[in-house]
Image: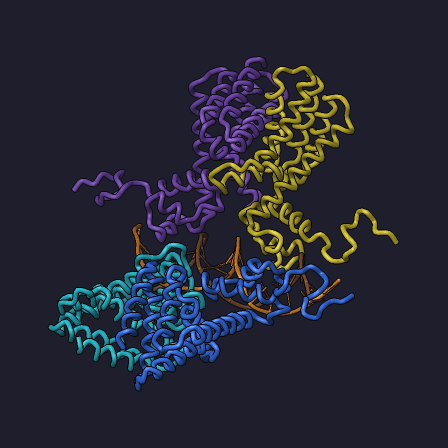
Chain colours: A yellow, B purple, C cyan, D blue, E brown, F orange
Amino acid sequence: MTDSPSSPAATARRPGKRERLVAAAAQLLHQQGTERTTLADIAKVADVPVGNVYYYFKTKDDIIAAVIEAHTRQITTTLASIDTEHRSPKSRLKALVREFAAQSEIVAQYGCPFGSLCSELDKRAEEPIPAVAALMRLPIEWAEKQFRSLGRPDAHDLALDLMAAYEGSALLANTMRDPGILSEAALRVDRWIDAL
Amino acid sequence: MTDSPSSPAATARRPGKRERLVAAAAQLLHQQGTERTTLADIAKVADVPVGNVYYYFKTKDDIIAAVIEAHTRQITTTLASIDTEHRSPKSRLKALVREFAAQSEIVAQYGCPFGSLCSELDKRAEEPIPAVAALMRLPIEWAEKQFRSLGRPDAHDLALDLMAAYEGSALLANTMRDPGILSEAALRVDRWIDAL
Amino acid sequence: MTDSPSSPAATARRPGKRERLVAAAAQLLHQQGTERTTLADIAKVADVPVGNVYYYFKTKDDIIAAVIEAHTRQITTTLASIDTEHRSPKSRLKALVREFAAQSEIVAQYGCPFGSLCSELDKRAEEPIPAVAALMRLPIEWAEKQFRSLGRPDAHDLALDLMAAYEGSALLANTMRDPGILSEAALRVDRWIDAL
Amino acid sequence: MTDSPSSPAATARRPGKRERLVAAAAQLLHQQGTERTTLADIAKVADVPVGNVYYYFKTKDDIIAAVIEAHTRQITTTLASIDTEHRSPKSRLKALVREFAAQSEIVAQYGCPFGSLCSELDKRAEEPIPAVAALMRLPIEWAEKQFRSLGRPDAHDLALDLMAAYEGSALLANTMRDPGILSEAALRVDRWIDAL
DNA sequence: TATGAATGAGCGTTCATTCAT
DNA sequence: CATGAATGAACGCTCATTCAT
């Protein structure tokens, strides 16, 4: 019986505890915010004893950093897969918009996972954390590239506007607890892209 | 001894302890966030003894509510004064945009005072707080009225887009610590209004 | 009924809670050492709720600093009272030795309160703490002055030897749990002073 | 396969894991004290996996006991080698004093390794630990023998005074961070021995 | 034997809130 | 009205010790 390549190792031990912790932290940070989420909360959701958390992460900030990293990776993956599955810049941009709109329900409940994290972490440190800014920079730069492919000289501004429209609509949708705000904004952005 | 009824007392104590508390809270909530701001912080900035805070506000949530109320009042005042000073819907909308852009420096440092408050308070309670939503609803409804005056049947959507553009740009400006993101977005919105 | 001058104030409140905390800390630091003494220990002995400790002392280090200060004050007082009650340098020095010898029982159990504190605190910080060194410097300088009054040009060395003899004997007495080691060493120092 | 019985194993592992642990513990106990030194610290300095420590030592107290034993052995060795290399009691005593003075730099930094250990361990247990007391008793008894050889009936007291002078000076040197205090005290003791 | 991982009790500290005067 | 003091629950974090392999 060969070891399936997806399983981490032959050792039956360690069923991705670190991953579970990061996933639990990401979920709780999104739902409760950084300050209201305790390490005990994270440990409980991940089903890991509290003391054991510190074997994987030296401080709470380290867990937060891991969550940011996980988000960054997810964004990168999503953008790469859009690049693979779509050829034209317009269809790529619209795919991103669709991706955003697909989360409208959860965003209306808890806000944009990236946006609210950026907002909160800004208050945690004096200096801005580069890794956090990357959460916004990555999709902006990607969108800019698409707009440039469309021959737009104002590609950077368009990318900023696109991202701002999403983050702003996410905030409004969350504040009003109305997913429609986000999904309808997405529709308008979609038409705007078509009209470019 | 002719103590005028409007003056607080014969004792030379500064007027408006409550006002000072609310102002201090508003400032600190903006700069440090709700969770990282302690009542002791607020009391110190307001120069009020800690124990005395509870004479004016039963709980921390009450102070936050007072801050929201103060913000609401300020928004109302601003919109009213725009109404007074400008006649045409377009110049009114552009006046609001100018108002937003004027804060770009402080917004880049601490985020939009209203937006980040909405974002944070969403995580503080299960149920959304109507007073918080009003912070967004008020300018949206006002803008909607202006767009309607311009004869736009999609006035509501335009108002949402306007506010989303501001809040989204504020978030990006804060995340990147770049006031230019906000002020340049304002320029584009300005031209967009002109072009309507 | 006049307010007795020794009572702190007319307010019946605050029966020297801070003093009780410092006294409890001094006792426990002596008996258990700095590291093994918890704030809960101190609070319990002082009969003060744990949370309340932080009203008086911001950190554990602050309590330790207060204990050092209390010790410093006690040393100063003792030396001053010896100065008052004795005229000749020799009888003063012998009074100090008597003071040391009087504590032989408790020193044999827990070590010299000053010496063991110096020893422990040395390991707590990179830099030496001046206030700690004063615990040793004060009696040394005082003794030096007495030896100088006796016309000894090597007054400083004699003072160091005197203090070293006490601290060394205290350590031996504590290690062997034998108060006799300290009290008999004191007798020999006494004769040594007489013979000068 | 002729694995000589004295060589640890065929695997090229470094010899003396246990020895390395004791050496690391001795060093860290001296520099950081017993309470501030963690098993992880010791394991890291000894370059031994944490989990493996417990194969050699059941508890932290066991490692401490091993350090005491190592110190005891070292003292015994030193005294024996002095006995070998010196014939007269006086030159032997002076050799010990020289031994003490040679460590003045490190003692000024971290205290006497034996003295501070005695001081700390006194606070760790209710009952005094005989093995700890031996750290002091051994050199005292050795010195007593030398003084007795010199025909001194007060040999025991002289030995106590000698050791007390060293330990006391070590404490002062450490507290003031001044190696000179110890080395100059050693000079005076040297002259005192000569004058006997 | 060897080792990375696990565990839980406890530590120093914070803070919203209450109380006595 | 005003205020310094009091309170306790909880938080982030540490660490000696144990466990599974």
Spot occupied by residue D72 in the image (x, y as percentages of width and height): 48, 74
Spot occupied by residue B189 in the image (x, y as percentages of width and height): 55, 19
* Residue shown at the point (47%, 66%) measured from the top left: D34
* Residue shown at the point (46%, 61%) measured from the top left: D32
* The one of B108 and C97 positioned closer to us in this rendering: C97
Q: Quadrant of residue A73?
A: top right
Which quadrant, please, contains the N terminus of chain B?
Answer: top left
* The one of C25 and C88 positioned closer to us in this rendering: C88
Q: Residue furthest right?
A: A1
Determine whether B123 is above or below C9 in the image. above
* Residue shown at the point (33%, 47%) measured from the top left: B48
| Residue D111 visible at all | yes
- Left/right placement of residue B5 relative to residue D47 reads left
Which quadrant, please, contains the C terminus of chain B?
Answer: top right
| Residue C111 visible at all | no
* Number of on-image labels: 0
Spot occupied by residue C88 in the image (x, y as percentages of width and height): 12, 73
Q: Residue furthest bottom?
A: D153
Q: Quadrant of residue B172?
A: top right
Determine whether C117 is above or below A195 in the image. below
* The one of B98 and A196 positioned closer to us in this rendering: A196
Q: Quadrant of residue B165?
A: top right
